[in-house]
Image (cartoon, rainbow, N blue to C red):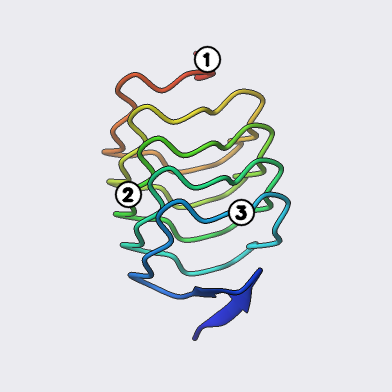
Amino acid sequence: MSSTVNGYQIEPGADLTGADLSGADLSGADLSGALLNNADLTYANLSGANLSGADLSGVDLTLANLNGAELTDANLSNANLTGAKLTAANLSGANLYNAIGVEG
């Protein structure tokens, strides 16, 4: 199932490279395998979203809500996770190389 947010098609495998989705409500969205590299997701609500296998390299997730998100095998290299909420997020196999704001 797909939907449109800020003029962008939200669906598995979507090409959202460089998209401005700041503040968007993407809770529960299925973006598995999507290309989100260099996208702006500051303040976005991605709680419960499926981002497994997604390319989030260079993405700005400052203060984003990723509580309960599925990030298995996602590429978060060079991502900005400053202040992001990651409670119960699944980061198994995720690439966090050079990601900033990651604690613990």
Q: Is residue 98 above or below residue 52?
A: above
Residue beneath disc 3 = 46
Q: Secondary structure at mark 3?
A: loop
Horizontal side of 16 relative to 75 (left or right) equals right
Q: Nearer the viewer, residue 62 or 16?
A: 16
- Is there a contact, CB below 8 Å, between mark 3 and mark 1? no
Q: Is residue 90 above or below residue 13?
A: above
Location of residue 75 in the rendering, given as x and y in whole percent from the top left corner: 30, 41
Q: Tell me the residue at 29%/54% (across/down).
A: 53
Residue beneath disc 1 = 103
Name, please, the residue furthest toward the top: 104
Q: Nearer the viewer, residue 6 or 67?
A: 6
Q: Tell me the residue at 51%/83% (across/down).
A: 2
Q: CA distance from mark 3 to mark 2?
A: 15 Å
Residue mark closest to the camera, 1 vs 2:
2
Q: CA distance from mark 3 to mark 1?
A: 19 Å
Around disc 1, counting alpha carbons within 10 Å, would you say few (fewer than 14), some (14 to 19), or many (20 or more)?
few
Q: CA distance from mark 1 to mark 2?
A: 21 Å
- For marks 3 and 1, the one nearer the N-term is 3
Q: Tell me the residue at 51%/56% (across/down).
A: 19
Horizontal side of 16 relative to 60 (left or right) equals left
Amino acid carrying mark 1 in the image: Glu
- For marks 1 and 2, the one nearer the N-term is 2
Location of residue 14 in the rendering, given as x and y in whole percent from the top left corner: 38, 70
Amino acid carrying mark 3 in the image: Leu
Residue beneath disc 2 = 55
